[in-house]
Amino acid sequence: MKEYICIVCPRGCHLAVDDENDYAVTGNACLRGAAYGREEAMHPTRVVTSSVRVRSRKHPRCSVKTDIAIDKSDIAKAMLLLDDVELIPPVRRGDIVIASLFGSEANFIATRDIDE
């Protein structure tokens, strides 16, 4: 039995997921909570946010995030990839900073504009 706190809404239901009983979820107040509990137990994913260096005195860092959620087990490897990145202005929100993380559809993208 695995226990989670649901993050789908502000209610924060305490979920119990029985991995030995076809990932049956209890403690949820709605169907979205049940889906979240099953997904979290079977295949946890996260959107990763961080920042990278920018060749700029005015804005030395640019915030970035993955455009879709990636496997939770890949987060540390993804963060290491950002260590070697240095952007050169101009940078536009939505620009791809690192494409196709680990051969997937996920990309790191810039989340702000930097002109200089």
Image: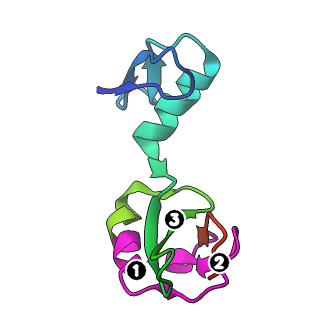
- Quadrant containing the N terminus is top left
Q: Confirm whether residue 107 shows in the render.
A: no
- Name the residue that disc number 3 marks: 63
Q: CA distance from mark 2 to mark 3?
A: 12 Å
Amino acid type assigned to the residue bearing label 3 in the image? Ser
State yes or no: residue 23 in magenta: no
Q: Sort mark 3 into few (<14), some (14-19) or many (20+) by Cα contacts within 10 Å.
A: some
Between circles 2 and 3, the one closer to the viewer is 3
Q: CA distance from mark 1 to mark 2?
A: 14 Å
State yes or no: residue 81 in magenta: yes
Amino acid type assigned to the residue bearing label 1 in the image? Leu
Labels 1 and 3: the sequence-earlier one: 3
Q: Position of residue 50 (x, y in %)?
A: 44, 63
The label on residue 81 is: 1
First to last magenta residue range: 77-105
Q: Position of residue 32 (x, y in %)?
A: 62, 24
Amino acid type assigned to the residue bearing label 2 in the image? Ile
- Name the residue that disc number 2 marks: 96
Between circles 1 and 3, the one closer to the viewer is 3
Labels 2 and 3: the sequence-earlier one: 3
Q: Position of residue 5 (x, y in %)?
A: 39, 24
Asked if 6 appears above or below 50 in the picture, the reply is: above
For label 1, the SS is helix
Q: Nearer the viewer, residue 31 or 107?
A: 107
For label 3, the SS is strand
Residue at screen point 57% across, 89% down: 88
Image coloring type: rainbow
Labels 1 and 2: the sequence-earlier one: 1
Q: Confirm whether residue 21 shows in the render.
A: yes
Residue at screen point 46% across, 25% down: 6
- Quadrant containing the C terminus is bottom right
Residue at screen point 40% across, 80% down: 81
